[in-house]
Amino acid sequence: MAAARPGLAQAPVFETTAQHAILVDAESDSVLFQKDADARMPPASMAKLMTMAVVFDALKSGKLHLTDQFVVSENAWRSGGAASGGSTMFAKLGSSIAVDDLIHGGIIQSANDGCIVLAEGIAGSETAFAEMMNTEATKLGLTGSHFTNATGLPDPNEYVTAHDLARVAKHLIADFPEFYPIYSQTEFTWNKIRQYNRNPLLDMNIGADGLKTGFTEESGYGLVASAARSGERLILVINGTKSAKERGEEARKLMDWGFTSFERVGFFKDGDVLGEARVFGGNRGSVDLVGKGAIDALLPHGARDGMKGRIVYQGPVKAPIKAGQEIGTLQLTSNDQLVREAKVYAANDIGVGTVRQRTQSGLGELLFGWW
């Protein structure tokens, strides 16, 4: 059976003028709010989150180093530089720039030229780099996104969803803690020109520490943001607001609402047996199932009553089974809405049964439909 996507748990009513929006608890992946979150939309500069995901992965693997130098090509200078009219770090044609500076320019200044230089330096061309972005998107489980360039400059064949952008943001936060703090830096000076981070939440004293704004005529004003308060972290994506002012106001309202309207509820401790799965052909008829770590979720205040849980898996599970083997998912629902799902694993080894045990499994399936 296929597990469904997490939904809303009878959350208090909230409305936003943004065309697309999603608010997610970073720890549990509980979706607190969504509006057309799985519809395709132009990413604008928010596509640069995926650009940096590829760059950070290359740094982490040792294929790239912060001190490496890349040359500013004529393509990067013309397509992403000051003459293009877009965001730029004013990279000089033919100059060599360290990867570290290019990253800061791409994140803080949203520099198109810096991102193109990175793409060409890593992959040889921006087109080849876009394929790396799509490969990374597949690894991250993005289902509604496709990338054709490293900048988010308009292209009808480049699109994302708000849900996918939230996944990329979580990836950057969780898997690259050494680089994520760059997103909270409010200014960067390059070529003697000081420029400022456009993220409106960074100056609002609400716990925001990233990530990326975006704007094109087609997409409207968008923002991928994250904030942490009292040990809780939320990830927000909005797009399609009509002005930078509206973008900041809507983002702040959603963040404040998320932090005040929900509470974290614990359901299972690490190591708790969550249930069992039937086994076919094993020396035992079932296997205990456990999660990895504690299982909790952000829920609207008072919504714990009425919570239900079920384990979904394809069965019977054929022996032999190794402890730690992924079996299925635990789904927690409230008022028939899925609010949390977590993978479940075999708690212990199950060996192949004797001839008699295997025969009994087969007869049980044939005669009684046990499975």
Image (cartoon, grey):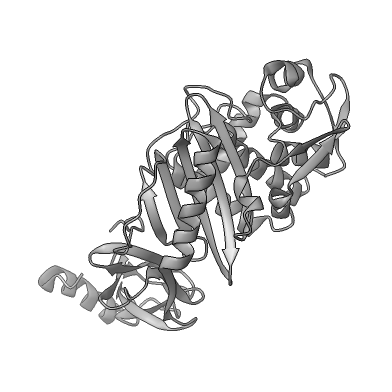
Residue 342, relative to residue 358: is it above or below? Answer: above
**Residue appearing at x 54%, y 23% in the figure:** 154
- Check the image and report above or below for 74 versus 248: above
Q: Position of residue 139 (x, y in %)?
A: 53, 47
Residue that appears at 38% across and 69% down: 299
Q: In the rendered image of this protein, does residue 35 appear above or below residue 291? A: above
Q: Which sits in the foreground, 286 or 255? A: 255
Left or right: where 277 falls relative to 223: left
Quarter occupied by residue 278: bottom left
Picture quadrant where residue 213 is located:
top right
For residue 295, side relative to residue 55 (left or right): left
Count of numbered tags: 0
Residue 87, by quadrant, is top right
Can residue 141 be seen in the rendering of this structure?
no
* Residue in front for this viewpoint, 289 or 94: 94
The residue positioned 29% from the left and 63% from the top of the image is 10
> Taking the image as drawn, is residue 201 in sight?
yes
> Taking 149 as reference, is 282 above or below it?
below
Along the horizontal axis of the image, is 233 left or right of 89?
left
Q: Quadrant of the N terminus?
A: bottom left
Measured as percent of width and height from the top left, residue 369 is found at 14, 70
Q: Position of residue 330 (x, y in %)?
A: 36, 69
Horizontal and vertical percent position of residue 315: 28, 66
Q: Quadrant of the C terminus?
A: bottom left
Residue drawn at 78 percent across, 48 percent down: 62
